[in-house]
Amino acid sequence: MNYNRKEYSEEELIRLYRALLKPRMIEERMLVLLRQGRVSKWFSGIGQEAISVGSALALEPDEYILPLHRNLGVFTGREVPLDRLFAQFQGKTHGFTKGRDRSFHFGTNEHHIVGMISHLGPQLAVADGIALADLLENKEKVTLVFSGDGGASEGDFHEALNVAAVWGLPVIFLIENNGYGLSTPSNEQFKFKHFIDKGPAYGMDALQIDGNNILEVYDTIRQAAASIRKNPRPMLIEAITFRMRGHEEASGTKYVPQELFERWAKKDPVENYERYLLDELVLTQKAMESIKDELKAEIEEGLNIAFNEPMPTANAEQEQADMYRPFNQEVIKPASEAKTERRFVDAISDGLRQSMERFPELVLMGQDIAEYGGVFKVTEGFVEKFGKERVRNTPLCESAILGIGLGLSVRGQKSMVEMQFADFVSAGFSQIVNNLAKSHYRWGQNADVVVRMPTGAGTAAGPFHSQSNEAWFFHTPGLKVVYPSSPYDAKGLLNAAIEDPNPVMYFEHKLLYRSISQEIPDDYYTVEIGKARTVAEGTDLTIITYGMGVHWAKQLQQELSDASLEILDLRTLLPWDQEAVRAAVEKTGRVIILHEDTMTGGIGGEIAAWISEHCFEKLDAPVARVASLDTAVPFAPPLEQEFLPRQRLRQKAEAMLNY
Ligand SMILES: Cc1ncc(C[n+]2csc(CCOP(=O)(O)OP(=O)(O)O)c2C)c(N)n1
């Protein structure tokens, strides 16, 4: 192996050696413990340590690194205390996730590390978000994120690199090309020759390095980082290496030709560097032994502490509470009586504009939201007022933008992501349900992101511009879901969602945008998240609904003028207002849950079950649901009208009144 020590001092070379040795010695110890059944799963990075260690030491300690499952050297390189690291591996409270997630699936802002989620690709965009915050704050910093050669096949890889290039984000995308993704060799994973061929295609510089050569890794990344700090831009670095053990320890290596192991064993990053330092007389045998002794003692001490800690005790209340960053919403009243008649769409826009004024750290992202003003014109005029840095047109990449939202949160910023249509959120689903929703529970990092979701049918727009998909998110702990039905609530709930440090899905029905208006306060105000609103008081039949359903229920009241309807607008779906539901049910003893979403698995099912369980004695009739047909949303208006529940509502209401 060719080592070029350049101007590096002996201290520096020994610092690198020590850092390189540490993960190797930990791993060797782990393999013994694994055989003894004292640790569970283990993803070995043996043979690849130079990449983790070289990059961790090359960056400034306050620059973020986003490692993967084989990057123990990043954690040790950042001096994460071993007792906590081992406690983390064992699911102990003293680890970084209170026993809630395993291995390297955690972040620690103290050490400027954001760990992976199992899905691999999503964290590439999180790095973009961290880098964007640095760029917006004019910090001369670089963020480094890892990808394997396998994970690079994911769409998230493309999205993250593309946005980073278009926005000139200071990110190093470090690809560890180790020849295999689980059992899949490179020739079954991709057709191109080298990852560096991809750099120019994205419009970014790309470098290939020997990933087993610690000096080459360290020096290349140091230089790249120095250059990026001065001239922010992304860079792709491909580190060629080899995975010396199985994908994880239980899975074996039968599928890897033996001669590859033999060839790569000669390139072992630790042994070669050790020999080099001895040959160069930088290190004596004695000094080497004493470093090993010190590391051994540190490892044993860490293991002792971790093994002696008991397993965590479960507390259901605490577990549920920790899904969210605690936030005591203070409901804000408008400062004056001034009011203006505004359409639903204008109320949203008004709230968003005032939130932008209130929170200088709020960034808006979405397709065509800048000069064009968004397809529904919610952000019209925003670029002129707030500038292009905060009102950001994005490439077509829902997943990346949502990941960027999480990255911005890591750096203390807020974001609002506009889905052009709620339907398109499926392209960013994993980021929302796996990354944003679970981050606080896993390692205490909130995702301060509001996702605006123009939703709903009735516009003859067919299956992909009409869906109601709130139930996808209603089923995801860690999210909040709000769904206003009036201009007043639209503004107040949007402001509240932006104030809330947790991820909030904000549904806005497209059909309401320009069809309803109301006098609403000119000043900033908020509406309480989690609080339903009684729209009409009645004695005969309760309709529990939200969004467009509120308007259908009001129309029904006009049609059935002899009946007295209690109408409850949930306004927030997660968490929904159980006490208000109970009170509304108790008033009439007959209840219909109405929603535009399809019936099966809809929110009505959950609320109906809860009413049956908690209000059984107060019921005079079975709990009923009225919802859309269990089909996709059809295009032609007669089909769409049949799909929607509006026509079935009256029939069901009459049946319930006569029950
Ligand atoms: C979305 C997703 N699909 C599949 C997996 C299962 N899986 C975990 S790691 C892995 C291989 C990853 O290969 P690579 O990115 O090259 O990293 P390496 O393990 O070689 O370091 C696979 C298929 C996963 N975790 N996430």
Image: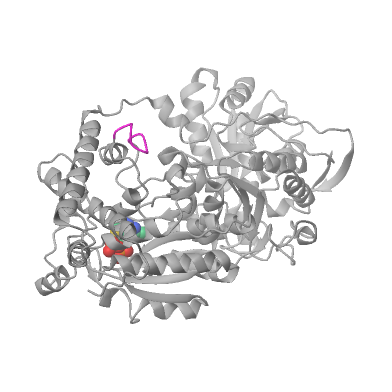
| Residue 359 visible within the image | yes
Q: Main secondary structure of the magenta part?
A: loop
Name the quarter where the C terminus is drawn: top right
Residue at point 47%, 30% (across, down): 321
Give 108 or 656, whichever is nearer the viewer: 108
Give 638 or 4, whichever is nearer the viewer: 4
Residue at point 21%, 54% (across, down): 24
Name the quarter where the N terminus is drawn: bottom left
Left or right: 309 in relation to 119: left
Residue at point 49%, 38% (across, down): 605
Q: Give coordinates of residue 221: x percent, y percent.
A: 41, 66
**In the picture shown, does residue 109 fall above or below 390?**
above
Q: Give coordinates of residue 185: x percent, y percent.
A: 23, 72
| Residue 476 visible within the image | no
Q: Give coordinates of residue 556: x percent, y percent.
A: 71, 39
- Extreme top residue here? 617
Q: Give coordinates of residue 174: x percent, y percent.
A: 39, 66
Q: What stretch is highlighted in magenta?
A: 92-99
